Each structure stands twice: as structure tokens, then as C-alpha cells.
Image: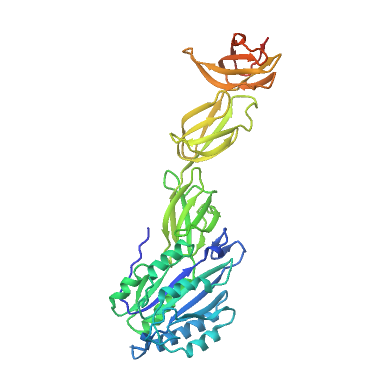
Amino acid sequence: MYRYHILRRTLMVFTALVLTPLLNLSPLLQAQGVTTSGYEPKSRILFIFDASNSMAGQWDGARKIDIAREILFEMVDSLEQMPNVEMALRVYGHQSPVPPQDCSDTKLEVPFSPNNASLIRQKLRFINPKGTTPIARSLELAPGDFPSCGNCRNIILLITDGVEACDGDPCRVSLRLQQQGIILRPFVIGIGSDPGFRETFNCIGEYYDAPNSQEFRKVLKVVITEALNVTSAQVNLLDTKQQPAETDVNVVFYDRFSGVIRYNMIHTLNSKGNPDTISLDHLSTYNVKVQTIPPVTVENIKLVTGRHNTIGIDAPQGYLHIRTSRGKAYDNEKILVKRAGDPKTINIQEMGNVGKYIVGHYDLEIPIYPLMIVEDVEILQSYTTTVEIPAPGIVTFNSQQPGAGTLYQLTDEGDQVWVMNLLENSKSQAFHLQPGSYRVIFRRADLKSTSYSLVHDFKVDQGSSETIKFY
């Protein structure tokens, strides 16, 4: 698990939140550079700008709003030159002066569209601080500012100098958006030491300290770079010797909060025998599922920006081969594979095929006559465990008339163990039976007395053929 060091001295705050609405997500590859559409996803940045009354205050020799506006101008100029980037502007606290307090004072001033940087600059020039600070309300409305898109990374940059001034709770809003399928990963740049900021943003942010406007400009560039870039990673599927030797299995990255699939791949070793490098959006926290049998899951994976991340997952595997000693009587028979001692079926494997399983112990339920249970089959690393089933014999039951019958297997102790009930509407029926001793009880349907019940014991050998006649 990676840990982030968080600075919490704050007065003026810059928060970057990445949002990916559930309805906009493709169910397949969502990582930057590897998508269902085959091209790099568009990054859409929504600036949420604080124009509340407190932004008229002085900071570092000028009004806070003027410094924030000039630095944002520079950022818009830079982003305007980048391909696959669109911007939009939401402002709050700029329409209704205080008092009274207008907690609905938030508006999307410039919607997303190509080449709209000049509109954003023009709108920012004529905004003056007036009203209150409805941060939670602005965050609630922000997802609706993003038009539907199947191949986009949606980023929010919130610039504010104050804590929530209305009854809203930004932390609660953040959690609710994540539960609805929206991913939030904030960055907070703080100046000063107002303790209220720590309480408000502690739940949603990584804090960066900026003691003056020059440092604020530097940190803002770092945050933008981190928000737009992707991070390289590799998934090491480890064998019992902790070597990354396992491969060729589906690996799925889920968003930690919403459960939405963010990335889907078949794990690959490259030409040098090393796990292939992939590009991942580091702004999400992931749960990763390796679709081995049974699957392996690792939760709460956080990527570190600016370095190559290695994700190690224990996934040692071996092979299981189930076959008959001879003949094709059981070809395509479906075998239920379960964890040893667990009644839940984890796989259905066909007779004669080879299956791959996580190292461990398994129980097999083989639906032949009699039903066969093979317990505690051990799967070893990179080894094929073979379970061989004796070849059956064929037994045919004939009668002049249909009737009711029951077949039992006889134990060495003389007990009879139920195998099956015969078909009541058939005069002739044949079954493959495992070698052993059996007993059948039968009565014709047209003979209405128990005294007509017939009992017949017989033996089955591998590959034998026998006919039982009820006359």
C-alpha cells in the first residue's frame, strides 16, 4: 500500500477532482492510451472558480481573486495548446452580494466546447467577488456540466479561499458522488493556517503548501501535470517462488468506490519474459481481480505518480487433467470442481481436458453412475495432476412392459447405496456404470401387486456389456 504525505496548513485552496460518471464509462478498457475506441481519451477540465466576497481580500501584495485569475489565465493559455483537452468554467459567489446569503449562487458560465479558451478568459476578466461560498452545491452540480462521452477523463479544478459557507458538506457530497460511480481524487494547495480548511478538506484531499503566489504558480503546474498524465505500471503474477512467471489470464481493474470496470486486459509477458508495461490513470484507486480459478483479488491499490509502479499479486497455478482409463464413454462429461471442503462449484471442466487452477486442494464431483466424489486433489505449481476414472461397462435393462425400478450399488459390507431410479415409461434403457456390484429392483406397471417386484444382483467390469431382462 502506498502512503501519501499530506500538508494541511491552508487558507487559499486549489482542489482538483477527477470525475468519471458511471453512465459515461465504457465497460471495457478505460486507461489512458488503451481504450475501446483505439485512440487516446479526451481530458475535460472543469474549472470551479471562487468569486465569493472573501476573494476580494489581500494576499501577497494583491487581491486574492486577481492573483488566482492571472495564474488561471496562464494555465488556460497552456492548456489551449494541448491536443485532446477541453475546458469549461463554473463560477460561484459572483451573482448575489452578501448579505443576504444566496447558497444557490453557482453557475456554469462557459460550457465544454472546442477552442473556447478565449470565452473563459473573457468571462474571468469581468467577474468580481460578491457573495457566499456554496462549495458542496457546486460539486453536486458539476457532474452535469460534462456532456455524455464514452472516451473521456473528466477533471474538476476547484479554486477557493474559503470553507463551505452554506449548510452543504463537501465531504459527504464527495462520498455520495463516488458511491454513484464518480471517482474523486483531489489535490489541495494551501496558504496560511486556517484550521477550518483542515476540517473541511481533510476527507477529500492531498494538501500542497504554497506560501506565496510564486509557489502557488509552481504547485499549480505540478498538479495540472499530475492530473493529465498517466502512470506506467506492471502486474507481477507471482508463483510459489515469488517469481513473476504466471501469465495469460484476464486481469480487471475496478474503481475502488463505484465498482466500475476501468481497465480490462489479458496479462502478457513481453519478448524478454517480463510482465508487459501498461498505462493506468493514477487518479483512481483500484481493486484488481485476476480471473484465475478461483479468482484472486487485491483491494485498494494506489499508484504513485512519476514512477513505474509494480503490482505484485500471488497467483501460483498448476494443472488438472481428468480422463478415463480407456474408451470414449465419458467424452464431454462435465465435472464440477470445488475448493476442498467447500460445496460451492468454482469451475466446470470437461472430461479429457486440462484445467488450470490456483495451487491448493480441490474436490471433484463427477456426474457419472454412480456419482463419483474425488476429495482432496492437490494442485502443485506448474505440475499436471492427473485423475483417472475407470472405464465403465454398459448395462441394458429390458422388460416386456414399462415399469418402476431402482438401481443400487452394493458395498463390501452388504449395504445398498442408491444410484438412480429407472425410467418409468421405457421398456428398454441402457446406462454406463462404473465397475462394481449392483442390485436392481423392478416391477412392471401393469402388474399391480408388490409380489411381482423382481430383485436382480449383477456385476459390472471395465468395458463389459450386459443385458438385464425382467421377464
Along the line of sight, the residue nearer the viewer: 463 or 364: 364
Q: Quadrant of the C terminus?
A: top right
Along the line of sight, the residue nearer the viewer: 140 or 435: 140
Can residue 72 be seen here? The reply is: yes
Q: Relative to 239, does residue 143 appear above or below in the rendering?
A: below
Can residue 7 be seen here? The reply is: no
The picture places residue 155, in percent across and down from the top left corner, at 49, 72
Residue 184: quarter of image = bottom left
Instruction: Work out which residue is located at the far right of the displayed protein and give it.
Output: 400
The picture places residue 202, in percent across and down from the top left corner, at 34, 69
Going 46% across and 13% down the picture, which residue do you hit? 413
Going 56% across and 60% down the picture, which residue do you hit? 29
Report the label total. Answer: 0
Image check: 194 left or right of 80? Answer: left
Along the line of sight, the residue nearer the viewer: 140 or 258: 140
Residue 283: quarter of image = bottom left
Q: Quadrant of the N terminus?
A: bottom left
Along the line of sight, the residue nearer the viewer: 257 or 452: 452
The picture places residue 456, in percent across and down from the top left corner, at 60, 10
Q: How is the image coloured?
A: rainbow
Going 42% across and 43% down the picture, which residue do you hit? 240
The picture places residue 366, in percent across and down from the top left corner, at 55, 29
Q: Relative to 48, does residue 177 appear above or below in the rendering?
A: above
